[in-house]
Amino acid sequence: MSELRAQPPKSKVQEIRRLWMEKRDEEGVLASERWYEMSAKPVALAWRGRFLQRLKRNDEALLLFDQASRAGIGEPWFHISYVKALSLRGRDDDAAKYLASAIPKGKPESNGHLYDMQEGVNRRLARWDSAKDSGQLALKWRMDYQPFGRASILQKLISSLGVHLYLEIGVNDGSTFLKLDAPQKIAVDPRFKIPGGFENTDQEQWFQLTSDAFFLAQGSWLETNPPDLVFVDGLHTYAQSLADVYNALKYLRPGGMIVMHDCLPTSEAAAAPTTDRARELRGLADKGGAGGAWMGDVYRTILHLRSFNPELEVCVLDSDCGLGFVRPGKPESMLSLSEDQVRAFSYHDLVKNRESLLNLKTTDWFDSFEARLCRLDA
């Protein structure tokens, strides 16, 4: 019986995309160059630039993107790659002009990341009003096209809970924090990566320190200014996410709520307790097979809370890598795991019965849950 062979790609585009997904960048540079020599298609130039960009050959990539842009390529990935290349070379003014032209020509459903990039470019240029406008457009886009992503869910909760003070643990580049509209917001991160920097205002307070240090230093202030909504998206470990939840609960306003990110890992590598272990597991997997996000073992915090805290309602929304909801109240059900069992609970154990273990909820459930919150706040 003859050995089965993989079928060759049906088109040059499929070949290029396969090389991209498999991160075979050197081969991708050569394949896209041959494609352009055969076809003279500008999209081949753009793909070659994209491979070069990932190889850190940014000057070469920018020349190809410049050439391809004059042909009016409309793919969202091209706009993103080109703007990144411009910004890396300190050409934020050119990037802003390009985005101002590209966004109106794009399909509305594809413009979300372009609004994000426009916000970042405007912040780096200290065009604060324009940056705020871009952020609001990005949030509106998410509400329209990603209604159950974390930014959309958090903004809905801000409205339905009547939030006055929003606290975010683990802000990173501000991609969630900056877009949300609340009367007062507090950002906590040991190392902010905010485009254009950050400064305290009447609406936004920034604390560049660990969450443990923040709660220790600001505990007295939080006692008299309790947060209504806390988003926990810091270090993705069981120990730290559990500490963040318990610290937040100490100061949460009655009727308030905690939302946790990354409670529903997508692979064994994503669920690894450390980034080193995640890289090790990805090295054992086929290229491109394990995904790049590290969600850690935050899921163990959900198991812990559901085993040891009968005074808390805990569930996970099946959306955006799992959004955990924690708030004081009578739980629907409890687990009976010991701490040792929680620590030993593997990703494979989780996927066998994730619905019951995490008290997993559908997006339809969230719609009815939000409606109940609105009635309570009325």
Image (tube, rainbow, N blue to C red):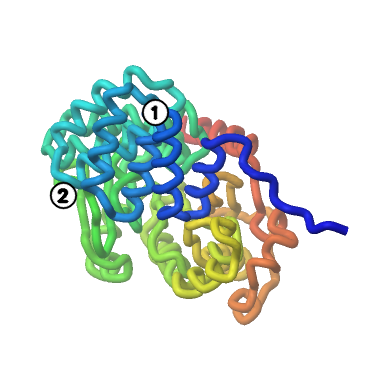
The quarter of the picture where residue 302 lies is bottom right
Q: Is residue 55 above or below residue 60?
A: below
Query: Regarding mark 2 in the picture, which secondary structure is present there?
Result: loop
Residue at (29, 33) in percent of width and height: 135
Most foreground residue, 293 or 315: 293
The residue where tag 2 is placed is: 197
Q: Is residue 60 above or below residue 268?
A: above
For residue 375, side relative to residue 344 (left or right): left
For residue 203, side relative to residue 321 (left or right): left
Packing grade of label 2 (10 A; few <14, some 14-19, many >=20) is: few
Q: Type of residue at label 2?
A: Gly
Between disc 1 and disc 2, the foreground one is 1
The quarter of the picture where residue 371 lies is top right
Query: Regarding mark 1 in the picture, which secondary structure is present there?
Result: loop
Number of labels in the image equals 2
**Which residue extends farthest top?**
105
Where is residue 98 drawn, in percent x and y?
Answer: 23, 27
Where is residue 332 drawn, in percent x and y?
Answer: 68, 53
Residue at (64, 57) in percent of width and height: 358
Mark-to-mark CA distance, 1 and 2:
42 Å
**Which residue extends farthest left?**
126
- Residue 283 visible in the shown view: yes
Where is residue 257 drawn, in percent x and y?
Answer: 46, 50
Q: Is residue 288 above or below residue 81?
A: below
- As drawn, the label of residue 40 is 1
Packing grade of label 1 (10 A; few <14, some 14-19, many >=20) is: few
- As drawn, the label of residue 108 is none
Q: Type of residue at label 1?
A: Ala
Most foreground residue, 323 or 269: 269
- Quadrant of image for the N terminus: bottom right
